[in-house]
């Protein structure tokens, strides 16, 4: 059996990352995803229908590309007809746009009553920001994520320099879609899923990033966040990260650093005291960090591992790809694409024992599969030629 979602058909009108990454994950799990794009290609093709640059390739692998001009009369009718035999419809227009284009929830539901319709936007369907443009760093700023990056070693905030809000939204959307499909299979019927990047990112950030805000009537109940214990430290020849949260780890780091006298010193050997006395915790951290600076990266990482301290070298992106565990796990796969040459991407992260799904290595140009897909939806050559002549498809 090829993938747990084999047999599920998805119309994907989304662009950029939040929607496309969600549907790519579903494609990886066996779903047949039809990527609907305007004739010039979606936003991240940068105006070139043939473009399959890294950002596009990394969010659209395994989808069949169909070119439809939603501005043309007849385009919405074509998509509604396709929706009749699909299971999921995904869009990430600004609020109200899908309706104006004739493919809003009510229209799609009328064509397919049990459709799972996933609508993704930046801030919500209404409210003071609803019609503002939403980009990943804007969402990071509004959720407190940027301000939360400050630490003792880097006492200023900074962006998380990856599309964390888009990707958090994508994973949330993929999970919600599969949950809705499961509910439909148990008799709940179709439904609309509304999801904003703002809500998804706040929910993603909250479990640890806002743990100190969780008890509004008792702010002392959890004064520290897990990330407040993160340490980023220089070694002789690089940097490492480490983390101390338990009594065993505290004693272990003194052994790793050959500071055995600290094992008997009540100012340094009790993790509970650190929680009660922040000044002592800071003094100990400064001592540890200074001592780490006298070791090479390889030496201190090995010492930390022996003493069961969570620790790793800070790798650059080229080094990360070649890391021993990444190589052992076969996390990154490479293959030859017929037009792009050698490609490298991570394989799907989850191994399904009963329903494995091999990596789908095809990445389409704009409209590459238009004729093939329309034929599967019942259009003969004359019908496709007529649609193309009307500018509905390309």
Image: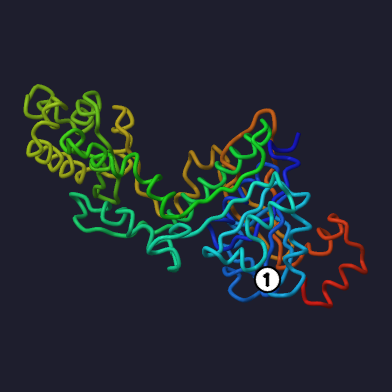
**Residue at (60%, 66%) from the top-left corner?**
53
Q: Looking at this view, is 5 or 163 the one in front?
A: 5
Count of number-bearing discs: 1
How far across and down, in percent of the image, does residue 323 sit? 47, 44
How far across and down, in percent of the image, does residue 35 sit? 69, 59
Residue ID for mark 1:
38
Q: Looking at this view, is 159 or 392 the one in front?
A: 392
**Residue at (84%, 77%) from the top-left corner?**
389
> With 209 as the anchor, is 375 left or right in this view?
right
How far across and down, in percent of the image, does residue 192 sit? 59, 48
Q: Looking at this view, is 323 or 356 the one in front?
A: 356
- Position of 161 relative to 290 (above/below): below
- Position of 295 relative to 101 (above/below): above
How many other residues sit within 10 Å of disc 1, few (<14), some (14-19) or many (≥20)? many
> With 82 as the anchor, is 122 left or right in this view?
left
**Residue at (27%, 53%) from the top-left corner?**
149
Seen as rendered, the residue at the extreme top is 264
Q: Looking at this view, is 6 or 251 the one in front?
A: 6
> With 75 as the anchor, is 123 left or right in this view?
left
């Amino acid at each position: 059996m090829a993938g747990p979602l084999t047999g599920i058909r998805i119309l994907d009108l989304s662009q950029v990352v939040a929607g496309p990454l969600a549907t790519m994950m579903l494609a990886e799990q066996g779903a047949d995803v039809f990527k609907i794009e305007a004739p010039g290609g979606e936003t991240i093709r940068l105006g070139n229908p043939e473009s399959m640059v890294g950002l596009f390739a990394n969010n659209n692998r395994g989808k069949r590309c169909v070119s439809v001009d939603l501005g043309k009369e007849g385009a919405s009718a074509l998509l509604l007809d396709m929706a009749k035999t699909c299971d999921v419809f995904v869009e990430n227009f600004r609020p109200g746009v899908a309706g104006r284009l004739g493919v809003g929830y009510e229209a799609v539901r009328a064509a397919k009553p049990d459709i799972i319709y996933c609508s993704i936007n930046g801030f919500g369907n209404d409210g003071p920001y609803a019609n503002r443009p939403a980009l990943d760093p804007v969402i990071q700023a509004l959720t407190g994520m940027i301000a939360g990056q400050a630490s003792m070693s880097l006492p200023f905030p900074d962006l998380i320099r990856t599309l964390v809000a888009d990707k958090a939204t994508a994973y949330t959307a993929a999970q919600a879609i599969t949950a809705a499909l499961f509910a439909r299979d148990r008799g709940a019927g179709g439904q609309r899923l509304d999801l904003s990047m703002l809500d998804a990112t706040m929910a993603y950030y909250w479990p640890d990033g806002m743990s100190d805000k969780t008890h509004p009537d008792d702010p002392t109940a959890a004064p520290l966040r897990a990330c407040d214990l993160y340490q980023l430290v220089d070694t002789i020849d690089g940097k490492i990260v480490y983390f101390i949260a338990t009594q065993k780890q505290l004693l272990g780091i003194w052994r790793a650093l050959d500071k055995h006298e600290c094992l008997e010193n009540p100012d340094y050997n009790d993790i509970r005291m650190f929680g009660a006395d922040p000044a002592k915790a800071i003094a100990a951290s400064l001592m540890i960090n200074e001592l780490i600076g006298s070791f090479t990266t390889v030496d201190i990482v090995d010492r930390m591992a022996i003493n069961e301290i969570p620790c790793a070298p800070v790798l650059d992106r080229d080094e990360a790809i070649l890391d021993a565990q990444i190589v052992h796990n076969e996390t990154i796969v490479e293959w030859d694409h017929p037009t792009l040459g050698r490609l490298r991407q991570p394989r799907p992260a989850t191994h399904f024992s009963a329903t494995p799904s091999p990596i789908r290595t095809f990445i389409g140009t704009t409209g590459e599969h238009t004729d093939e897909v329309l034929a599967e939806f019942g259009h003969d050559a004359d019908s496709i030629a007529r649609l193309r002549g009307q500018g509905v498809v390309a």
